[in-house]
Image (cartoon, rainbow, N blue to C red):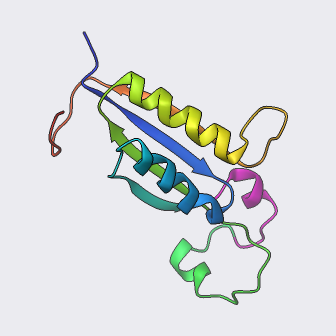
Amino acid sequence: MKPKGYVLFVVLSNAKNLKTVLKCLKKINITGATIIDSIGSASLYSMDDIYIPMIASSMKDLDTQKSYGKTLFSVVKDEETVLKAMDEIEDVLNLDIKNPGKGIMFSVPIYSMKGITEH
């Protein structure tokens, strides 16, 4: 069965890189995405209050050492566009195995979808 599209996931360690990623996507005509706050498990291990809900913890002092990131996901019409987006983001953010800690990205094929328009 041929995929009907792909979901591109971009997990950013630093939320400051979000606008850069969005510009990369817009450049290749990917205009829709969902963005959520996220935190890596390595950061959680160093926290004392890991069981406090995210909203409650965000109301705490803004000068804490906690490092929150962003996770972006977007439905993309074809594999060629996904690979092009990933190459562009990799170049702009300098993501590579020799430079860890900036984030990760991956894609997942979609074989069935509801609630969105198929391309």
x, y (%) of residue 93? 68, 47
64 vs 26: above or below: below
Q: Residue furthest front?
A: 27
Q: Is residue 44 magenta?
A: yes
Residue in view at x 76 percent, y 86 percent: 63
Q: Toward which corner of the image does residue 7 lie, by quadrant?
A: top left
Please give left or right for residue 26 compared with residue 63 in the image: left
Which residue is at the front of the view, 60 or 69? 69
- Indicate the quadrant containing the C terminus: top left, top right, bottom left or bottom right: top left
x, y (%) of residue 78? 33, 26
Q: Residue furthest right?
A: 98
Q: Which residues are magenta?
A: 38-49
Q: Toward which corner of the image does residue 86 lie, by quadrant?
A: top right
x, y (%) of residue 115? 15, 46
x, y (%) of residue 99? 82, 40
Residue in view at x 32 percent, y 52 percent: 32
Which residue is at the front of the view, 85 or 45? 85
76 vs 50: above or below: above
Please give left or right for residue 111 compared with residue 53 in the image: left
Residue in view at x 54 percent, y 62 percent: 19
Q: Is residue 112 magenta?
A: no
Residue in view at x 80 percent, y 75 percent: 65
Please give left or right for residue 89 compared with residue 115 in the image: right
